[in-house]
Amino acid sequence: MPTIGQRIKQLRLENNLTQEDFGKLFGIVKSTVSMYESDKSIPDDEIKKKIAEYFQVTLDWLMGISEIRNPADKITDSVSDDPELAKFWDELKNREDLKLLFKQIKDMPPSDVKKIIRVIKAIEDEEAAHDDL
């Protein structure tokens, strides 16, 4: 499994940030970022949380415990074989009012996740139909 240092470097490079730029985001100096990336030092819990929040990844992914970067990724995989649900999920996944629900359903079997997304879609469709009246 990747180390936290490797994950930090991956996030930094994916976002075209220098070590200095990355450090400024979290109130740390370039040398500290370098120490993190080379696994000579580990960020404290507050910095880990800030990094995870900023880059919208789970702490488990950041620390190399899981390959699921974001709880939404698991749900995306669950609905990927249904184009209509996949499109609807793309619209839903960034809604703040549903993020807690997504955290609750991410570990469910894909068939159950699909059912829940279908229910949400039915509610949204019903509300849209009422709005059109």
Image: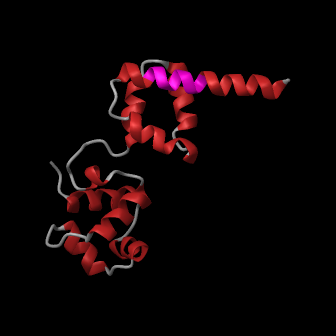
Q: Position of residue 97 (x, y in %)?
A: 57, 45
Q: Position of residue 8 (x, y in %)?
A: 28, 61
Q: How is the image coloured?
A: secondary structure
Does 129 sit above or below residue 24? above
Q: Report whether 37 appears left or right of 100.
A: left
Does 88 sit above or below residue 102? above
- Indicate the quadrant where residue 7 lies: bottom left
Q: Position of residue 74 (x, y in %)?
A: 36, 34
Asked if the stretch drawn in magenta spans residue 115, the answer is yes
Quarter of the image for the C terminus: give it.
Answer: top right
Magenta segment, principal secondary structure? helix
Q: Residue at x 21, y 51 (%)?
A: 64
Q: Residue at x 39, y 25 (%)?
A: 78
- Indicate the quadrant where residue 81 lies: top left
Q: Residue at x 25, y 78 (%)?
A: 32
Q: Report whether 131 appears left or right of 11.
A: right
Extent of the magenta region: 114-121
Asked if the stretch drawn in magenta spans residue 25, the answer is no
Please name whichever residue, 95 or 2, is drawn nearer the observer in this view of the structure.
Answer: 95
Q: Residue at x 55, y 22 (%)?
A: 119
Does 36 sit above or below residue 27? above
Q: Position of residue 107 (x, y in %)?
A: 32, 33
How many marks overall? 0
Does 56 sit above or below residue 32? above
